[in-house]
Image (cartoon, rainbow, N blue to C red):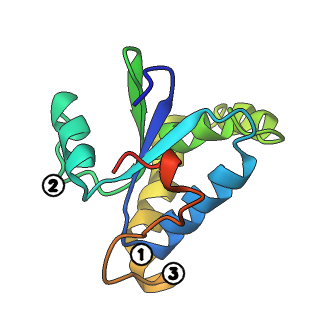
Amino acid sequence: MGNDKKIILFDGVCNLCNGFVLFIIKRDAEDVFRYASLQSNIGQKLLLERNIDSTTTDSVVLIEPGVAYYIKSDAALQIGSHLKGYGSISRILYLIPSGLRNIVYDLIARYRYAWFGKKDSCMIPTPELQAKFLE
């Protein structure tokens, strides 16, 4: 799994989350990220290694191996900072206190299935994208 890659854990059955991952893949010009669903064995292992409670974490987690991990709006903004054309937006949104950002994030996370739908199983990447997924 190359230690230089940042790992995005996402809700594999969430339509919004899957759309977010596809959005990132299209804009990840420098091939910075790898992906795994929160529900996968590797996703659960990575959460456990960082003492992140998998029963309360149901949103995006960004892991920088050997450095740090980010959750909620911090994860989204860190991801955005690596996407061409979105770094400035991320820097501006970082000016908003994380407590306020996370209120909005939590609201969207709470209703994401109702608003965007849910799949019966995790996304299966196409053969072209398979190398970007850890499991």
Cα distance between the residues tagged 1 and 3: 8 Å
Find residue 65 and report its horizontal and vertical position in percent.
39, 22
Tell me which label, 2 or 3, sits earlier in the chain.
Answer: 2
> How many marks do you count on the picture?
3
Give the residue drawn at x 50%, y 47%.
131
**Labels 2 and 1 touching (C-beta < 8 A):** no
Residue under numbered circle 3: 116
- Residue at the outermost right position: 85
The answer to which of marks 1 and 3 sits earlier in the sequence is: 1
- Under mark 1, the amino acid is Tyr
Residue at the image point whose x is 42% and y is 70% from the top: 123
Q: Amino acid at mark 2?
A: Thr
Q: Position of residue 47 (x, y in %)?
A: 23, 39
Q: Which residue is mark 1?
A: 111
Name the residue tied to disc 2: 55
Considering depth in this image, is 46 or 2 the residue closer to the camera? 2
The x and y percentages for residue 79 are: 59, 39
First of labels 2, 1 by sequence position: 2
Q: Secondary structure at mark 1?
A: helix
Q: Name the residue at 72% across, 54% down.
A: 26
Query: Would you call the spot at circle 1 few (<14 residues within 10 Å), some (14-19), or many (20 or more)?
Result: few
| Element type at mark 2 | loop
